[in-house]
Amino acid sequence: MTALKPVLPAAFAAGATLRTPGRTLTSGDFAAIINATWENGPLHTDDEYMSGTGFGRRILGGPCLLAIAAGLSSPTMYASWAAAGLDCHAALGIDEVRYEAPVFENDTITVDIEVHTLEPTPGGSAFVGRVRDVVRKQDGTTVLTMRRGYLLKPIAEDA
């Protein structure tokens, strides 16, 4: 019998694309993230109101989707950074956020993390890694795109 070998994500390097596991967003997920963010307008909380709109039902708020996408991508990014010998020391920002399509209860989303650059800082003690995220629903529809940056430092060899 052949021994199983773990499959590690591609190391964090320019040109790599990492994909997260999927997550189906339940009514409980909607309620939790709406309550945590106070994104509580009728688009996100009022079934009756939304039944008369072009969407026909409640949609997840954009800021809520940002938080879910960031959380969903964290394990994949940290595993990739570790495989590349790096550790995240700071998030530098989120730019160029675009909401492309609505997300409804029971949609399953994944995040493709496209690594654009990994460049040393001016002092050479760290790196700035920049990624472009593409969040998709189960049918392949893009629902969100954004760019993020991170300050990454080499993992100490004695760690």
Image (cartoon, helix red, strand yellow):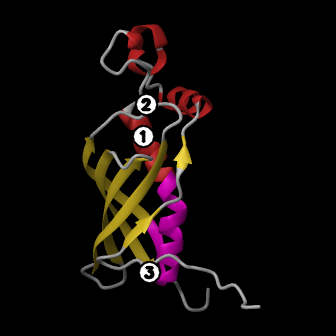
Q: Residue at x 28, y 83 (%)?
A: 123
The reply to whether dot 2 and dot 1 touch (C-beta < 8 Å) is: yes
Disc with the residue nearer the chain's start (2 vs 1): 2
- Separation of disc 3 and disc 2 at Cα? 32 Å
State how far apart marks 3 and 1 are (Cα): 26 Å
Find the magenta span and give its range. Answer: 72-89
Q: For this rendering, which residue is in front, 32 or 157? A: 32
Mark before the other along the chain sequence, 3 or 2? 3
Residue 91, by quadrant, is bottom left
Q: Amino acid at mark 3?
A: Ala
Judge the density around disc 3: few (<14), some (14-19), many (≥20) Cα neighbours within 10 Å: some
Instruction: Provide the residue designation for mark 3.
Output: 11
Q: Residue furthest toward the right? A: 1
Q: Position of residue 9 (x, y in %)?
A: 50, 75
Q: Residue at x 42, y 56 (%)?
A: 111
Left or right: residue 96 compared with residue 107: left
Q: Position of residue 145 (x, y in %)?
A: 29, 50
Position of 114 relative to 14 (above/below): above
Graded by Cα atoms within 10 Å as few (under 14), some (14 to 19) or many (20 or more), the crowding at tag 2 reads many
Residue 43 picture quarter: top left
Residue drawn where x is 31% and y is 72% of the image: 128
Figure check: 96 above or below 54:
below
For label 2, the residue is 60
Q: Dividing the image into 4 quarters, which one contains the C terminus? A: bottom right
Q: Is residue 15 above or below residue 51?
A: below
